[in-house]
Image (cartoon, rainbow, N blue to C red):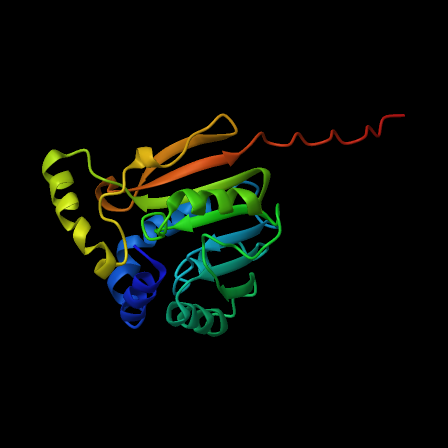
Amino acid sequence: MDLNSIRNAYRRYARHYDRIFGPVFAPGRRLAVQALDGGGGQRVLEVGVGTGLSLPFYDPDARVVGIDISPEMLAKAQERRERENLMQVEDLLVMDAEDLQFPDNAFDTVVAMYVASVVPHPDRLIDEMRRVCVPGGDIIIINHFASRNPLLRGLEKGLRPLSRMLGFRPDMDLDSLPEMEDFQRIGVRNANIFGYWKLVHYCNGERQQQEPEPSTAA
């Protein structure tokens, strides 16, 4: 996997992506947005926003920035933003997920839907997502992970040589995602049909404790 092969794959997908992948992946997209902690008012970064299929699901009070490596996919997202008057979408930017051009702690929540098996270096993706997310913020990943079924797992491994053409790795293992003391998984849930895709929910370090409101008692 490299950036050129990814761009080429999603240039091919852009025109037909919504029709082919929209209905299949829609439950996972809704689940990811529902998992956001804190409701409206959050500043959210969606990494790999693609054609913007998830954008209508965000709370109208959210402030959403989407990035993607494919200009063709992002053009579709921009069309959706204007067509559906999605005022919660602050910006849509062409950007490498492994080199996010944002300052540290810029977002309350960072979401990556169907991206972890696409990028060349998933560890760099996670590092960048953590860097731009506030301490205690939520990081949510939805992705296909290698099956536990020996037959399906063998099929996935057999497709590995086609990763550059497909635009993703078909045999990425859930255990390849990190879990550390300051980056703990809050939970793993099935998403989409047959649980073939999973939502992995992280807390980026310890959650900040809210200051108690001053007492109004006399």
Can the viewer see residue 36?
Answer: no
Residue at the far right in the pictured view: 218
Relative depth, front residue between 110 and 209: 110
Residue pictured at 52% horizontal, 29% vertical: 182
Residue 16 occupies quadrant:
bottom left
Horizontal placement of 69 versus 207: left or right?
Answer: left
Residue 151 occupies quadrant:
top left
Horizontal placement of 213 versus 56: left or right?
Answer: right
Horizontal placement of 194 versus 212: left or right?
Answer: left
> Total of numbered circles in the picture?
0
Image x and y of residue 205, in percent:
55, 32
Relative depth, front residue between 58 and 139: 139
Residue at the far left in the pictured view: 151
Vertical order, 176 against 98 (above or below): above
Q: Which quadrant, please, contains the N terminus?
A: bottom left
Relative depth, front residue between 205 and 165: 165
Image x and y of residue 193, in percent:
24, 46
Image x and y of residue 29, in percent:
38, 51
Can the viewer see residue 142?
Answer: yes
Residue 24 occupies quadrant:
bottom left
Q: Which quadrant, please, contains the C terminus?
A: top right
Image x and y of residue 206, in percent:
58, 29
